[in-house]
Image (tube, rainbow, N blue to C red):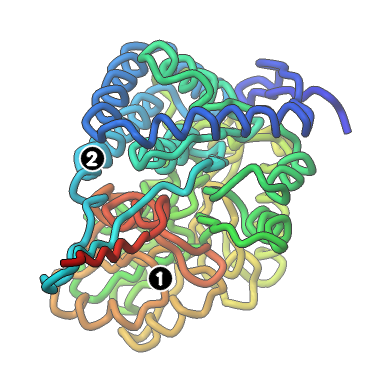
């Protein structure tokens, strides 16, 4: 395998940056440095950790313009939207810092004469953080900030496509005064990452990425008793009930399907609409999707950028063509979106109807600006079809009847149930998937449980 890798920007297909991979020996040495630094860090007061990470945020966010520009060039998101990821980064980080004291506080059972008893949360030690390229800052902050707040050290390996984000995080942490060695940035290929996980240097792994990637990490850790937090893919569904506010549903579901060119694990791909509202919803969705401006993401007028690569676009086009051959109707002409030449990373958005669950486009994560619309005859059929998936990240219900949503939610095999919104992560609520969408939890007070281990203290007093 090559000793170097390149970031090929989807903006114009050029080489944006080149980096050298670390060897396994270098990675193991970095993990050893991290472990040595972590012992002192874990002994520091929580208030001191919070102050340092708050300084980090101030340093990091002072470079918003540079960060937003680099984000656009690495992943192709329109520059008008890139600053939004920085706002989300800040909100998640500040929330987790603010919740650490309560979330990590010991649990004390009812008093028992002659004994001191507590259930404490102690850090794992060294946490490997493996974020994804599609939201490179958000998938990173979900793990490394609470990991450090909990007293862990962090070995950090970003996706090759967005590795500059990791560099900027490391620089800002150093400028804020984080102890040397506590956050170790690595460039690793997949085999070296697997070998590092298989060795004794790590105590926990946080991964955001594909189902295949999650399985590879499980195999790598199969001979070890360490925890894995796996935030994997989705083929998420929306259900528009007969009583929904249709204009609101159309606007929000289209945005949930098309934002970031559909490259979101919780983006809406399957839309089930009550048959009484189906025609009106489909007409509105097609009209609104047709208004997107596909083009150069560095242009502030662009509202839809390229997908991450020409190869990714080709896979989406092949999925659409297979759906068409199986009887699906594609409602938008790619020529309407001039930048789509049928070969590049610039991919026109698409709305499909006449789809079935036998089609790949309704079964697998597409990761492109694609939305499938299917009529249903009420709640029972919608629930059955939402659950007819190997994924279980989110489901979004569009209704003006909150009691109906509350009745439906327990039957939905997903980690998050929304009502009248989608494609969103509230840092006060746990982010969790079921089935092939992963396991474990990030963010919220519950997220701290994954990044620590319980330790029982049972002291008996004599005399």
- Residue 132, image quadrant: top right
Describe the element under mark 1 as helix, strand or loop.
loop
Q: Which residue is mark 2?
A: 95
- Residue 326, image quadrant: bottom right
Question: Can you name the residue that lies furthest to the right here?
Answer: 1
Residue 201 appears in view = yes
Describe the element under mark 2 as helix, strand or loop.
helix
Question: Can you name the residue that lies furthest to the bottom here?
Answer: 380
Residue 388: percent from the left, percent from the top? 51, 80
Task: Name the front one of labels 1 and 2.
Answer: 2
Residue 113: percent from the left, percent from the top? 11, 73
Residue drawn at x 77%, y 39% is 192
Residue drawn at x 66%, y 50% is 316
Q: Is residue 128 left or right of residue 44?
A: right
Residue 393: percent from the left, percent from the top? 44, 63
Residue 296 appears in view = no
The image's mark for residue 414 is 1
Residue situated in front as seen by the camera: 116 or 366:
116
From what the image shows, is residue 10 above or below residue 461? above
């Amino acid at each position: 395998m090559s000793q170097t890798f390149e970031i090929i920007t989807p903006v114009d297909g050029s080489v944006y940056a080149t980096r050298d991979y670390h060897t396994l020996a270098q990675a193991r040495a970095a993990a050893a440095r991290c472990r040595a630094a972590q012992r002192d860090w874990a002994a520091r007061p929580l208030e001191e950790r919070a102050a340092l990470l708050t300084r980090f945020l101030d340093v990091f966010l002072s470079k918003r313009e540079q960060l937003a520009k680099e984000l656009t060039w690495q992943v192709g998101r329109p520059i008008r939207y890139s600053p939004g990821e920085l706002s989300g980064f800040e909100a998640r980080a500040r929330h987790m810092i603010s919740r650490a004291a309560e979330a990590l506080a010991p649990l004390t059972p009812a008093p028992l004469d002659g004994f001191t008893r507590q259930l404490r949360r102690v850090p794992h030690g060294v946490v490997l953080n493996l974020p994804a390229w599609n939201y490179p800052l958000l998938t990173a902050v979900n793990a490394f900030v609470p990991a450090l707040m909990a007293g862990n050290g962090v070995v950090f390996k970003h996706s090759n496509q967005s590795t500059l984000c990791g560099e900027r995080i490391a620089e800002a942490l150093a400028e804020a005064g984080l102890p040397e060695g506590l956050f170790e940035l690595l460039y690793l290929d997949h085999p070296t990452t697997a070998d590092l996980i298989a060795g004794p240097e790590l105590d926990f792994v946080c991964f955001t990425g594909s189902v295949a990637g999650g399985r590879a990490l499980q195999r790598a850790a199969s001979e070890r008793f360490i925890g894995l937090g796996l935030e994997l893919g989705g083929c998420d569904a929306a259900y528009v009930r007969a009583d929904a506010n249709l204009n609101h549903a159309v606007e929000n579901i289209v945005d949930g399907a098309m934002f970031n060119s559909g490259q979101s694990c919780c983006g809406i791909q399957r839309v089930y609409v009550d048959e009484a509202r189906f025609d009106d919803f489909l007409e509105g969705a097609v009209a609104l999707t047709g208004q997107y401006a596909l083009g150069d993401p560095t242009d502030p007028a662009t509202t839809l950028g390229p997908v991450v690569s020409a190869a990714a676009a080709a896979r989406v086009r092949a999925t659409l063509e297979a759906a068409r051959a199986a009887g699906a109707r594609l409602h938008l002409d790619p020529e309407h979106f001039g930048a789509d030449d049928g070969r590049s990373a610039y991919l026109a958005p698409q709305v499909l109807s006449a789809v079935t669950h036998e089609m790949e486009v309704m079964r697998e994560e597409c990761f492109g600006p694609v939305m499938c619309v299917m009529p249903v005859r009420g709640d029972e059929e919608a629930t059955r079809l939402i659950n007819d998936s190997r994924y279980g990240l989110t489901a979004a219900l569009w209704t003006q009847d909150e009691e109906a949503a509350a009745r439906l939610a327990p039957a939905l095999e997903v980690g998050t149930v929304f009502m009248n919104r989608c494609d969103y992560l509230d840092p006060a609520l746990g982010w969790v998937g079921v089935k092939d969408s992963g396991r474990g939890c990030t963010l919220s007070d519950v997220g701290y449980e994954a990044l620590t281990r319980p330790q029982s203290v049972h002291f008996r007093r004599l005399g």
